[in-house]
Image (spheres, helix red, strand yellow):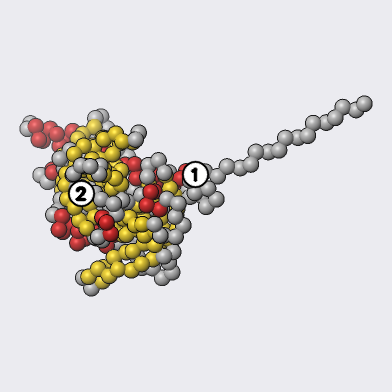
């Protein structure tokens, strides 16, 4: 019996014990049935009952997932790629299958409409839309101490980008320590907004190519390209992605993309006396912020603190002794 045949037989036997199974179709026509545990940019990990297999991405033709209720997801890979990752409200999305790498030129044309400019009376920054209802991410320091915020969006229309300014912008959640803010455009009659996917910053490799889109020094829709210098640069008690992609004032809050078109970081600072020393908040920190946004809900009465504190109960007056 050949090794390949033995491998397929083992996979087939293990699939019998999985109640709600995912199916990975391989390029050599074989299939693996099991429960997908994790996805990395180069591998997919599958529990086949008696062991966990690491399946190389470049050997996968298609992934068909069970919805865990006994119904198999029969959507095409393209449709499944935008499966909601936050079932709480579908606030953001991530790809569930490996997206192909493309050139920066192709990706900029596709993603540009989802990158926005965030304006306040004291300055401007960048941001990106994560939900077609108008939710967007930017840096906390871009909107810190501000109550008048506008967002300029570049809508795709007849093959061209048409700029429109929205002035009814609500602060949904803020995290000063992670330098993140969640905003929502609430103007009447808004269209469905173009959005981006949040990627997996943990799966990045040092040396991997990335690019940023933003408005450095007010120069809107500027694209800079570089590589990941390190994934775990400690700065002020937090870990950041370090990149050679040029980051300047005005880039703050904008997306850092990989070559699959997924946001792997939020650009937020640079070392001013050096070149090619930019930093971005990892996408995993952004996902945590979004998934726990109730804990960071913005309070108009106390904009520097996400919590509302109640007055303590008054003490009961002591009774005087009868004389």
User: In front: 264, or 314?
Assistant: 314
Cα–Cα span, label 2 and label 1: 32 Å
* Residue 224 image label: none
Which residue, as the protein is rendered here, is positioned at the far right?
Answer: 323
Q: Quadrant of the C terminus?
A: top right
User: In front: 308, or 264?
Assistant: 308
Q: How many marks?
A: 2
For marks 2 and 1, the one nearer the N-term is 2
Q: Position of residue 55 (x, y in %)?
A: 18, 38
**Dot 1: within a 10 Å radius of its alpha carbon, few (fewer than 14), some, or many (20 or more) residues?**
some
Residue at 20 percent across and 49 percent down: it is 246
**Which image quadrant is residue 156 in?**
bottom left
Q: Which residue is mark 2?
A: 246
Q: Position of residue 303 (x, y in %)?
A: 49, 49
312 left or right, relative to 184:
right
Residue 75 visible to an observer of this rendering: no
Residue at 40 percent across and 40 percent down: it is 177
Q: Position of residue 71 (x, y in %)?
A: 33, 50
Which residue, as the protein is rendered here, is positioned at the far bottom?
Answer: 158
Q: Position of residue 236 (x, y in %)?
A: 34, 35
Residue 136 visible to an observer of this rendering: yes
Residue at 83 percent across and 31 percent down: it is 319
**Dot 2: within a 10 Å radius of its alpha carbon, few (fewer than 14), some, or many (20 or more) residues?**
many
The residue tagged with tag 1: helix, strand or loop? loop
The residue tagged with tag 2: helix, strand or loop? loop
User: In front: 71, or 178?
Assistant: 178
Q: Quadrant of the N terminus?
A: top left
Q: Which residue is mark 1?
A: 305
Residue at 34 percent across and 41 percent down: it is 285
């Amino acid at each position: 019996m050949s090794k390949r045949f033995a491998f397929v037989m083992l996979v087939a036997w293990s699939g019998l014990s999985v109640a709600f199974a995912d199916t990975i179709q391989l390029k050599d026509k074989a299939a693996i049935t099991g429960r997908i545990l994790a996805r990395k940019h180069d591998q997919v990990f599958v529990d086949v009952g008696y062991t966990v297999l690491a399946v190389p991405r470049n050997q996968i033709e298609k992934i068909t997932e069970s919805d865990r209720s006994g119904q198999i997801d029969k959507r095409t890979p393209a449709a499944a790629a935008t499966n909601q990752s936050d079932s709480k409200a579908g606030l953001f999305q991530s790809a569930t299958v490996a997206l192909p790498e493309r050139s920066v030129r192709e990706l900029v044309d596709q993603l540009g409409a989802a990158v926005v400019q965030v304006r306040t009376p004291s300055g401007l920054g960048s941001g990106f839309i994560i939900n077609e209802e108008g939710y967007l991410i930017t840096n906390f320091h871009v909107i810190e101490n501000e109550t008048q915020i506008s967002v300029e969006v570049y809508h795709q229309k007849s093959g061209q980008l048409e700029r429109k300014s929205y002035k009814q912008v609500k602060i949904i959640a803020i995290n000063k320590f992670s330098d993140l803010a969640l905003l929502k455009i609430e103007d009447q009659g808004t269209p469905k907004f173009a959005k981006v996917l949040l990627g997996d910053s943990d799966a990045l490799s040092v040396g991997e190519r990335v690019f940023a889109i933003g408005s450095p020094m007010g120069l809107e829709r500027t694209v800079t390209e570089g590589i990941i210098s390190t994934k775990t640069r400690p700065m002020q008690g937090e870990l950041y992605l370090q990149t050679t992609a040029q980051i300047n004032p005005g880039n703050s809050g904008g997306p850092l993309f990989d070559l699959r078109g997924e946001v792997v970081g939020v650009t937020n600072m640079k070392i001013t006396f050096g070149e090619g020393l930019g930093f971005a908040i990892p996408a995993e920190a952004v996902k945590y912020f979004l998934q726990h946004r109730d804990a960071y809900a913005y309070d108009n009465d106390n904009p520097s603190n996400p919590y509302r504190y109640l007055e303590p109960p008054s003490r009961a007056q002591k009774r005087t002794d009868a004389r």
